[in-house]
Amino acid sequence: MRKRITALFLTAAVALAGCSSGNNSQQNSQPAETTTAQQMTEAKAESEVETEAGENQASYDEVKEADVIIVGAGGAGLSAAIAAADEGAESIIVVEKLGKTGGSLNFTSGSMSGAETVIQELDGIEDTKESYIEDIMSNGAGLGNRELIEIYVDEDVDAIEWLWNHGLSGYTFSEQNGLKSVFAPEHQLYSVERTYKPKAKDPANYKSAVHEILDKEIAGYDNITIDYYTEVTELLGNDKGQVLTAVGYNSDSKKTVCYQAKKGIIMATGGYSGNPEMMGRYAKHGDKYLIGGADSADGKGIRIMQTVGAAVDQDKLSYIPTFPMGLEYSQGKGAIGDVYMWKAGGIYVNQEGKRFVNETLDEVVPRETALEEQTDAVQYNIFTDKIIEDLKAANAAFMWEYYYEPEEGIGHKLIQSADSLEELAGIIGVPADALSETVEAYNAAVEAGGTDEFGRDFSGTPTAYSVAVNKIEGEKYYAVPIKALVVMTLGGVTVNKDMQVVNEDGDAIPGLYAAGEVVGGIWGKFVSGGTGVMGPVVFGRISGRNVVNLELAEGQAVEKASFVLDSALFEKKEASAESYDMSGIKDGTYEAVVDGQNGDMTVQVVVADGKIAEVNVLSNHETENIAAPALEKVPAAIVENNSPDVDGVTGATLTSGRIREAVKECLEQAK
């Protein structure tokens, strides 16, 4: 039965025992659903009275209570909420700091994987869970948690069947040889076709079919509430050693909210792939990686749990898998978009002008790790007109023809060309003599045939990674920078098989669960295809069941862990530029066009009485479900502050920046 539970909006002192810093013992009595203004005033006054310990009780603008509190509305959080509701939780609050659900599912097409699934059965493909387990262990360099991987592989079958029965069966899949079960070349290949690529039915709002299905299902539960624009900043323990209280700040209402759970809190806050400072701290060139996901994936959730005792393996924070094929479409942001010219004879050189890897190697991990070691994690694909022609002739130029060749393509501006290697070297900033020596050695290897020092084969035998053999020579030389791209991280808090967060002694912290990318050490050093989507779904379902069904134990006094992430990794950078000078602007209506995500953005500014009266985004080609909050909030904030220097919307910083840039151009016209 789906039961409607009214959310409680109370002042701090009404639920003082649970939501206070001075006394965090769990409150057993249910407070009234409504309070009079006089009661609220008296409660607030009482909350400000000093306790016997001489400390002031914390004061909150609102207090909300539910059976289960879930922090994060990505794949793990949404799956946990549904599972908890199905297990009998009467009230569930999902706290989400953005204005939308989905988390990293907003940035991926959502490839899934699984063995012995209903999809493989329909395709007539024989597979075993044991084979899937071994592939995941092997792909993770043998460093994964076998117990959790075995649990995942077993539970994954039911999760995929649940999705199938809740709408996935009606989706269109990207197929190979007429089958939905495919090999995925963007990852290390599995030994069996067990990757599934369903396409979202509403591509304007969803990139992932899994996200689309979860959203639709969540909408059918009256006892699940999602609090948007609310970032949890603190977890609190009570005098029973239980963590049942979360404190958050709503950036929309400007209110501090205290959330009190009866059964437990599930942290599903994601990883740190959007935090260059943190990645740079734990990976050699991590701060140079292109961010391919949400900038809201900042890793704060890990630190918040450490303050109540969560264990984190520091070594595993360096487990940051990358794609050696990142197209930088905006500063620091990227997507999978290699030119693939090396398939027809092109080469990769590093910032020093030297080759460093077999470009045509059919294994992803060696190419990935080789790029991570190069200066600034960047490589330049060097090629010629003949190589472009041969790649097209082999029908292997999809990325080039889609992202690069068209003037409106997001990678077109990255193409550099020159009449000589020396000129090209100067343009891309690599030593000319080194680049010339590299190309001479490569061309000699092509003439000699066989294989070169990196193991690249020049026999001319066609493969999926080599469609033509060419020297680097011609009348026109080209270069395109390709960078290491990160979409997920593999470090995080430590959990047990029940998804309970454990302390540094290995003991479960009562009331605290975690699921999704915020959990570390599951997959090993590298990720297997489809686990980035199905892992959060599976472990979210497990945590949702367990938070309802496992007995809420008592534990030792809550203390922070001995290792806690440096708070400096999460500090907001101060703007270096001074506030925009608004003096001298003239009344009128002005328009400006700036580069957008998939095309131009046109913004109109109306100036009246020397102030910004209106900001209208007349047209844009942003990704709708990601950009919507910025398109709504940033123009309003600019008008309210009479300045383009306003904060961007978390999760939509690129769109926010484009709007501000266009407004500044309009204001320059007004001067």
Image: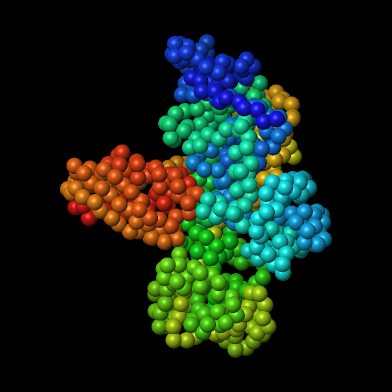
Pick whichever, 165 or 491, lies toward us. 165
Q: Is residue 41 visible?
A: yes
Q: How many marks?
A: 0
Residue 633 as seen in the image, left or right of residue 473: left
Q: Is residue 46 visible?
A: no
Q: Position of residue 528 (x, y in %)?
A: 68, 57
Residue found 61% across the figure and 62% down from its top: 369
Residue 338 as seen in the image, left or right of residue 239: left
Residue 147 as seen in the image, left or right of residue 313: right
Pick whichever, 462 or 613, lies toward us. 613
Q: Position of residue 230 (x, y in %)?
A: 50, 35
Pick whichever, 39 or 270, lies toward us. 39
Is residue 47 shown above or below 405?
A: above
Q: Quadrant of residue 127?
A: bottom right
Residue found 58% across the figure and 61% down from its top: 323
The N terminus, quarter of image: top right
Q: How is the image coloured?
A: rainbow
Q: Position of residue 661 (x, y in %)?
A: 33, 53
Return the residue found at the far bottom.
447
Residue 268 as seen in the image, left or right of residue 388: right
Residue found 81% across the figure and 62% down from its top: 124
Q: Position of residue 193 (x, y in %)?
A: 74, 63
Is residue 40 shown above or below 66?
A: above
Q: Quadrant of residue 313?
A: top right
Residue found 65% across the figure and 28% down from its top: 3
